[in-house]
Image (cartoon, grey):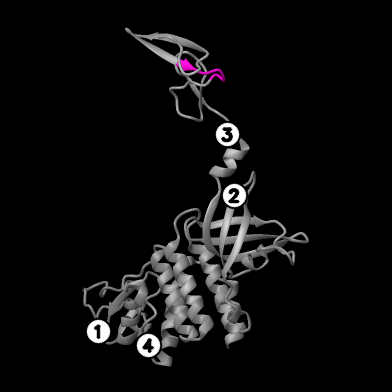
């Protein structure tokens, strides 16, 4: 077999009764091997070739939209952020010079800003190369009660959203919730209950609200909810000592939050006292499932009381 395509030389090795011809170019690369692999012997032994910094930069670049759910000032002008991105979930990133007045990333990397990001992986962390704000929710920043609730939502996302994985349902939930919160189109406690229950459901903590855990009854008035285990009981089957009485209207609302299509999840109404009961149940269920407290939730209760 004569050399072809600029090959420098041919190496051959006999394997059993067949001959394996390996074509190697002038740089020592086997032309029959895929890019990124380098032949080291005639038998096709391989080791992974080093990727150039320029090519690595290209391969590790992430282009996505997302929300800043946590920020930390570093030095005089830099900022470290946690992003909830649509395509890659939770991303920890570093924004150099983001706090400078003339920086394009100044607004885009602020807490609760929804922005378009171009991110590449540096040696030790992800680095924001470009950032352009899409929505910064200015109305929230002038209302302490609404802002504290939004910060609670952001902390929950940091706790429950997946890291470096698709997170479109999570981002959609917080964007729509903050839009309604900033516009005042829904009561805050109703939004809080919807956010908590829906977030837990998509994160794998969906409560069993289909029917009574024991007898399978779809409804009775009232019903009882076990916030620790996420179970529903009818009046006849409730365990001793369970006192979380739920009128059937609240049970229906909880089922709506958990099971309805996302486009309809915010579309229901309840009397104010029922909304307070719903918010209390959803909060207790969330705290039981996460098994931790949240400083932002404590702060929200302080400013809203």
Give the CA separation, mark 3 to mark 2.
Answer: 15 Å
- In the image, taking residue 241 as reference, residue 296 lies left or right, namely right
Which of pointers 2 and 1 indicates the residue nearer the eye?
Answer: 2
Residue tagged 4 = 269
Residue tagged 3 = 51
Q: Nearer the viewer, residue 224 or 154?
A: 154
Circle 3/circle 4 CB separation < 8 Å: no
Q: Which residue is found at the position 47% from the left and 86% from the top?
A: 185
Give the CA separation, mark 1 to mark 4.
Answer: 21 Å
Specify the farthest residue to the front.
Answer: 5
The answer to whether residue 106 shows anywhere in this view is yes
Q: Nearer the viewer, residue 234 or 263?
A: 263
- Marker disc for residue 120: 2
Q: Main secondary structure of the magenta part?
A: loop
Image vertical order of residue 127 relative to residue 297, above or below: above
Q: Earlier in the sequence, mark 1 or mark 4?
A: 1
């Amino acid at each position: 077999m004569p050399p072809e395509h600029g090959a420098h030389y041919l190496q051959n090795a006999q394997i059993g009764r067949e001959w394996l011809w390996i074509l190697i170019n002038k740089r020592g690369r086997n032309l029959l091997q895929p890019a990124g692999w380098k032949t080291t012997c005639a038998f096709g032994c391989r080791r992974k070739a080093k990727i150039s910094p320029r090519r690595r930069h290209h391969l590790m670049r992430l282009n996505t939209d997302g929300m800043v759910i946590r920020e930390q000032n570093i030095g005089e002008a830099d900022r470290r952020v946690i992003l909830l991105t649509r395509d890659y979930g939770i991303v920890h990133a570093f924004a150099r010079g983001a706090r400078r007045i003339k920086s394009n990333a100044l607004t885009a990397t602020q807490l609760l800003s929804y922005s378009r990001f171009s991110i590449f992986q540096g040696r030790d962390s992800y680095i924001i190369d470009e950032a352009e704000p899409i929505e910064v929710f200015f109305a929230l920043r002038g209302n302490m009660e609404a802002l504290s609730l939004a910060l609670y939502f952001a902390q929950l996302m940091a706790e429950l959203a997946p890291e470096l994985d698709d997170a479109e349902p999570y981002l959609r939930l917080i964007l729509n919730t903050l839009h309604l919160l900033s516009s005042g189109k829904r009561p805050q406690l109703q939004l809080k209950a919807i956010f908590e229950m829906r977030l837990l459901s998509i994160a794998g903590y969906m409560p069993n609200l289909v029917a009574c855990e024991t007898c399978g009854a779809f409804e009775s008035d009232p019903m009882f909810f076990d916030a620790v285990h996420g179970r529903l009981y009818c009046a006849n089957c409730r365990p001793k000592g369970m006192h979380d009485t739920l009128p059937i209207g609240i049970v229906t609302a909880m089922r709506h939050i958990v099971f309805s299509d996302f486009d309809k999840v915010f579309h229901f109404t309840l009397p104010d006292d029922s909304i307070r009961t719903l918010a209390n149940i959803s909060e207790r269920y969330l705290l039981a499932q996460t098994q931790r407290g949240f400083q932002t939730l404590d702060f929200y209760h302080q400013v809203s009381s």
